[in-house]
Image (spheres, grey):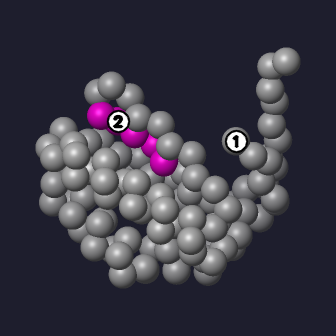
Amino acid sequence: MATLPSGTISVIFVAQRTGSDPEGYDRAAHDMDMLAAAQPGYIAIDSVRGTGGLGITVSYWINEAAAKAWRDHRDHAAVRNAGRGRWYSEYSLHVAEVIRSYDWQKS
């Protein structure tokens, strides 16, 4: 976790997995994490998944243009389409601007 600069764009992806092709999903998720990290304007990513298949992934981008470039990336679009066909029964995506950010850690 990291404190984010004000104005950071957060792309919040909330998805319910189907449970089909878990190995393919894991491979694609790893590949997308690596590809996203290599994109201009990428800051970080946080991701969690519950035992029932509900997951939340938040990617952070320096600005709206960088977030849109990731959305439009050819390889990302291909995996998104695969997800719609195989891995997800439903999802929601929300884009927000960070106004304030801070961290806390237990000592």
Residue at disc 2, secondary structure: strand
Tag 1: residue type? Answer: Met
What's the magenta bit mostly, secondary-structure-wise? strand
Left of 52 or right of it: where is 36? right
User: Circle 1 is placed at which residue position?
Assistant: 1
Tell me where residue 91 appears, x and y as whole percent. Answer: 33, 51
Left of 78 or right of it: where is 97? right
Q: For residue 40, what is the image quadrant?
A: bottom right
Q: How many marks?
A: 2
Magenta region = 53-57
Q: For residue 97, what is the image quadrant?
A: bottom right
Q: Nearer the viewer, mark 1 or mark 2?
A: 1
User: Relative to 50, is 28 above or below?
Assistant: below
Q: Which residue corresponds to the image point at 70% horizontal and 42% vertical from the top-left? A: 1
Label 1 to label 2, Cα distance in Å?
21 Å
Could you classify mark 1 by the number of other residues whose Cα lies within 10 Å: few (under 14), some (14-19), or many (20 or more)? few
Residue at disc 1, secondary structure: loop
User: Relative to 79, is 1 above or below?
Assistant: above
Of labels 1 and 2, earlier in sequence is 1
User: Relative to 45, is 54 above or below?
Assistant: above
Q: Which residue corresponds to the image point at 15% horizontal and 60% vertical from the top-left? A: 85
Q: Which residue corresponds to the image point at 81% horizontal and 59% vertical from the top-left? A: 5
Q: Which residue corresponds to the image point at 31% horizontal and 48% vertical from the top-left? A: 26
Q: Which mark is residue 79?
A: none
Callout 1–callout 2 Cβ contact below 8 Å: no
Instruction: Residue 89: say if magenta.
Output: no
Tag 2: residue type? Answer: Leu
User: Circle 2 is placed at which residue position?
Assistant: 54
Q: For residue 39, what is the image quadrant?
A: bottom right
Tell me where residue 98 appears, x and y as whole percent. Answer: 73, 56
Between 86 and 107, the residue placed more toward the observer is 107
Left of 33 or right of it: where is 103? right
